[in-house]
Amino acid sequence: PSTRNTYKSIVYALDNANDEEVKNSQSKKAALLEGVLSRMVKRDRSVEVGGPLFEALIKLHGEKGSFKAAKMAFDSIIGPCDEPCLSAILRVCSSTTPTHWKEAVLLTHSSDVVWGARGPGMIPTRALSYAVIACAKSDQWKEALNLIDLYGIDLKYRRAAVNS
């Protein structure tokens, strides 16, 4: 059976490929990871096992500017997400043009509790910061401040997130 290290090794191998076509092409890497994802058994589609693949795939689609593809990869996760995957999709929400601030707010409000997160809403600070940035870039300051009030970014991060 596959383990978390299996998927971590696949991502590492793609990131360090000797094949220049794969090494320098986000589209090729994404296609290869999509192929792996399509063959994953249900057990592997949890972040405990397949997390590294999901995170890498979400990031690759985000770097290509494809929110839809990144969201499809995120939606392929079975069960609660982890901080790296939640942060990755919220980063895509904040970095694609136009920003997907409504989706960022919805994901923040509806995400499963992430183990190890701090704050009343159990949303990790890094993930929450990306949601706030998505709102701020779209001049949705009221939504950004509501997220901060609801989920409580640590005071030392509050200024950085709002000024982004």
Image (cartoon, grey):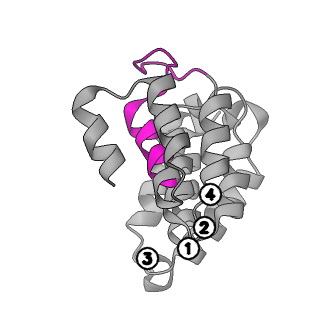
Which residue is tagged 4?
A: 100
User: Mark 3: which secondary structure?
Assistant: helix
Residue hosting label 1: 64
Tags 3 and 1 in contact by the CB under 8 Å rule?
Answer: no
Q: Secondary structure at mark 2?
A: helix
Q: Relative to residue 163, is residue 108 depicted above or below?
A: above
Query: The residue under label 2 is which amino acid type?
Result: Ala
- Image mark for residue 23: 3
Marks 3 and 2, how far apart at CA:
11 Å
Magenta stretch, residue numbers: 113-134
Q: Amino acid at mark 3?
A: Lys
Label 4, label 1: how many angstroms apart (C-alpha)?
15 Å
Quarter of the image for residue 62 reads bottom right
> How many C-alpha atoms fall within 10 Å of the one at disc 1: few (<14), some, or many (≥20)?
some
Q: CB under 8 Å between callouts 3 and 2?
A: no
Callout 2 crowding tier (Cα within 10 Å): few <14, some 14–19, many ≥20: many
Residues at marks 3 and 4, CA–CA distance in whole angstroms: 29 Å
- The numbered mark at residue 132 is none
For image coordinates 41% across by 65% down, the residue present is: 15
Please state which of the two labelled residues, at mark 4 or mark 2, is closer to the viewer: 4
User: Disc 3, disc 4: CB below 8 Å?
Assistant: no
Q: Is residue 82 magenta?
A: no
Tell me the mark number nearer the camera, choosing from 3 and 1: 1
Name the amino acid, label 4.
His
Q: Residue furthest front?
A: 142
Spatial distance from mark 4 to mark 2, Cα to Cα? 21 Å
Q: Is residue 73 left or right of residue 81?
A: right
* Residue at the spot of label 2: 30
Image position of 63 (left or right of 75) = left
Calculate the distance from the C-alpha at mark 2 to the C-alpha at mark 1.
10 Å
- From this viewpoint, is residue 132 visible? yes
Q: Residue at x 42, y 56 (%)?
A: 12
